Image: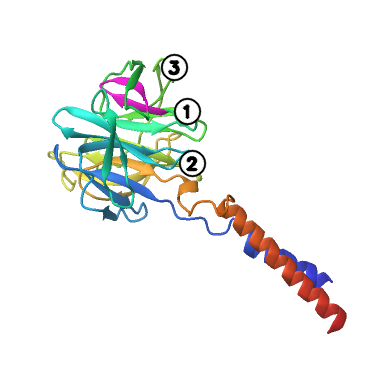
Amino acid sequence: MRYIILSIFTAAALFCSPGSANAVTIYGSAYIGGGASTLYTIDPTTGLATAVGTGIGYDRVGAMDFDPGTGILYGIGSNTPNTFSLITIDTTTGLGTTVGNTVGNFQDINFRSDGTLFGFAGGALYTIDLMTGAATLVGSISSGIGNGNGLAFDPMDTLYRINGATISTLDQTDASETMTGTVNYPVDFVNPRTNAMDYDLATGTLYASVIHSPAGDRPGSLSGANFIAEIDLATGDVSNARLTVAGLDALAVLPEQSATPGPTNGVPESMSTLWLGLALIGLFTFQRLRCVRFC
């Protein structure tokens, strides 16, 4: 009996534990100058970027994020000079579809957990209507247009912005800004800035697109190089900076619930796996008890 109980717990650990969670899936948009944008998947451990399709069909897609409720990837791009639109992006084909025109070129966008989309453009904070693309002003930001302007909600729905090396929080009712720290970029980065960032809410890891240029007169630095890195907003420390695709200007972490196949007969896959594990445990226990009695 003691052996049977131990076997049950072993089987439970094998079949019902969270197990090996899916590796984080990160999408990025890159373009050179004001040209056409391409969607990529990016490996944060190596920086390797793999193109999804042959182009989004829009120029200057420099802001994008996944809707946490639907898993739809939204972005801001232009298909006519000086006109920008909210778009959805197909993560299978890499193609974008217009939702509606918006106020201008957003430097970054990010969803709050309730599905409200916020964006930074021209030194101001906006909310963006997912049905029309219309932007509603929240407020102007005291530090102005800034440099880089990565925007991200943390797991507690605090809205962070990185302007150059300055870390700050933004009030979601009036855009008032509070400085909270400084980014400690690698010493060989010249004029570094975070032009996009997004949290992996499952692990609390903040991934960022970091660019530094030009090389200027500093020996050994890379001119105009793009990196994907992790930033700890509490300490400002930058880690795992990996060289990645040139022109990276938007970053979005696929939400955990969208990283696996959808519901099975109305039951989330994680629950289906749990029930399968429990069924196997039951069968295993029955066989062991039967063997104890009759073998």
**In the depicted structure, whether residue 282 falls above or below residue 18:** below
CA gap, disc 2 and disc 1: 12 Å
Measuring from the top left, give residue 254's x and y in whole percent.
41, 46
Q: Name the amino acid type tagged 2.
A: Leu
Mark 1 surroundings: few (<14), some (14-19) or many (≥20) residues within 10 A: few
Measuring from the top left, give residue 203's x and y in whole percent.
50, 45
The magenta-colored residue range is: 117-129
Question: Could you tell me which residue is drawn at 25 percent across and 53 percent down?
Answer: 53
Query: In the image shown, does 161 or 265 lie closer to the viewer?
Result: 265
Q: Which residue is mark 2?
A: 201
- Kindly give the residue lying farthest to the right in the view shown: 293
Secondary structure type for disc 2: loop
For marks 3 and 1, the one nearer the N-term is: 1
Disc number placed over residue 173 in the picture, else none: 3
Question: Could you tell me which residue is drawn at 37 percent across and 38 percent down?
Answer: 65
On screen, residue 151 versus residue 269, left or right, reads left
Measuring from the top left, give residue 282's x and y in whole percent.
74, 66
On screen, residue 167 versus residue 22, left or right, reads left
- Residue 80, image quadrant: top left
Q: Which residue is mark 1?
A: 158
Q: Name the amino acid type tagged 3.
A: Thr
What colour scheme was applied to this rendering of the protein? rainbow
Q: Is residue 223 visible?
A: yes
